[in-house]
Every structure is written in structure tokens, then in C-alpha cells.
Image: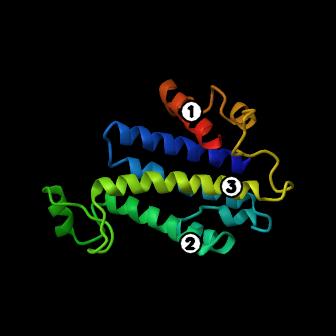
Amino acid sequence: MNLNAHFAWAFALWASAEESRSSGNLMLAPIGYYYACFHSSYAYLNAVPGIAPSTFNRMGHQQLSNLIKQHLDDDLRKEFDEMRDLRETINYLGLGDPRGKLMVLRGHNLRFGTPKDSLSFDEMITKSRDNSRAFIVRMLDEVALLPKNAVDTFPRRGDTEGFWLDEYMQEDIYLGLMSHEMRVKTYKFVQDILS
């Protein structure tokens, strides 16, 4: 159940981030994109045989990063950590001292990365979006490789029958959390990513 609940939440966060991005609310978008990665990896790791359920109590960012490295690979862990760094850079106006933050507020560029390879604000948003979607797809692919006894139902890429959508994305999902319009957008995102 944790696997499906956290994938459903990851999908909602991604769709919410996408809505924020497309409506011009660029400060919120990277939060949703990052937490979509967080919850999709959390979902996957919940189904990995041999990880004690107590491991997931009050899961922190670094703890999840370490589990990704241990049970998936270090490259994926680096991608996860970069998503967190992108989110924090955007949401905290950079990771430097208060003078730098004030400069950003006064119209100076917010940059991410090394001076030689830095990204502009728009490039950070695009990178967050693209990397988050790719990360979720990777988690779905990893779930499909788990032993059948580890998971009974889970979102499956290529699910043309719509089983998971019908079971876990019914009309009442997210009721009270988002508008009907947002629920429809989330459903369409899940249809797209599972196809």
C-alpha cells in the first residue's frame, strides 16, 4: 500500500509543479518536482525486500539519498541530490550569504552550478522539470524489476488496460486536496507517464 500511496502522491506533486510552472508561479514548481522524486523513490524503496519498515519512520532527505545509493546506484543518488540542490537554490535564493540573496531580490541573476557551467533561473526550472520526470520514469522501471512477491499491484509503464489508474486514481483521489481541474490534469499526467 505504501508503494501505491506514495506513487499517487508523487504524481500529484509533479502535476501540481507543472501547473505552477505553466501558470508562471516558478518559485513553487521546483518544490513539487523535487518532492515527486522524493515520493517516487520512497515508494520504490518501500517495496524492496530486506529493508526494515522502521527504516521509513520520519524519513529525511539525506537518509533517503543514502538508501537510493545503497539499493539503486550512486548516479541516481547524485541526480536526487541535484534535484534537492536545485530546489533549495531556487527556494532559498541561492545557497550563499544574505548579501547574495538581497542581490537576487534586487534583480541580479540567480545562478546554479559552477561559474563556468552555471544555469540561469529558467534553465533551473527546465532542468528540474525534465530531471524529475525522468527520475519518476526510472523509479517505475525499477519497480517493474522487483520480484512479484514484493509488490502485488503497482503503476506499470505500458499499462494500456488502465488497471492502476482505475484502482488508484478514482474520482475521489485527492478530493479536498486539489480542484477537479487539477485532479484531471494529474490523471492525464499519470496516463501519459504510464503509456
Q: Which residue is mark 1?
A: 188
Callout 3: 10 Å neighbours few (<14), some, many (20+)? some
Q: Is residue 61 left or right of residue 142?
A: left
Q: Is residue 183 left or right of residue 172?
A: left
Q: Which residue is mark 2?
A: 75
Circles 1 and 2, Cβ within 8 Å, touching? The answer is no
CA–CA distance in space, label 3 to label 2: 16 Å
CA–CA distance in space, label 3 to label 1: 19 Å
Q: Is residue 177 left or right of residue 155?
A: left
Of the residues shown, which amino acid type is indicated by label 1?
Answer: Lys
Based on the displayed image, in which of its 4 quarters is residue 11 positioned? Answer: top right
Instruction: Tell me which label, 3 or 2, sits earlier in the chain.
Output: 2
Instruction: Tell me which label, 3 or 1, sits earlier in the chain.
Output: 3
- Counting from the top left corner in percent of width and height, residue 110 is at 24, 61
Callout 2: 10 Å neighbours few (<14), some, many (20+)? few
**Is any atom of residue 9 visible in this view?**
yes
Secondary structure found at label 1: helix
CA–CA distance in space, label 1 to label 2: 29 Å
Q: Which mark is residue 168?
A: none
Of the residues shown, which amino acid type is indicated by label 3?
Answer: Asp
| Residue at the spot 55% in from the left edge and 38% down from the top edge | 189
Q: Which residue is mark 3?
A: 141
Circles 3 and 1, Cβ within 8 Å, touching? The answer is no
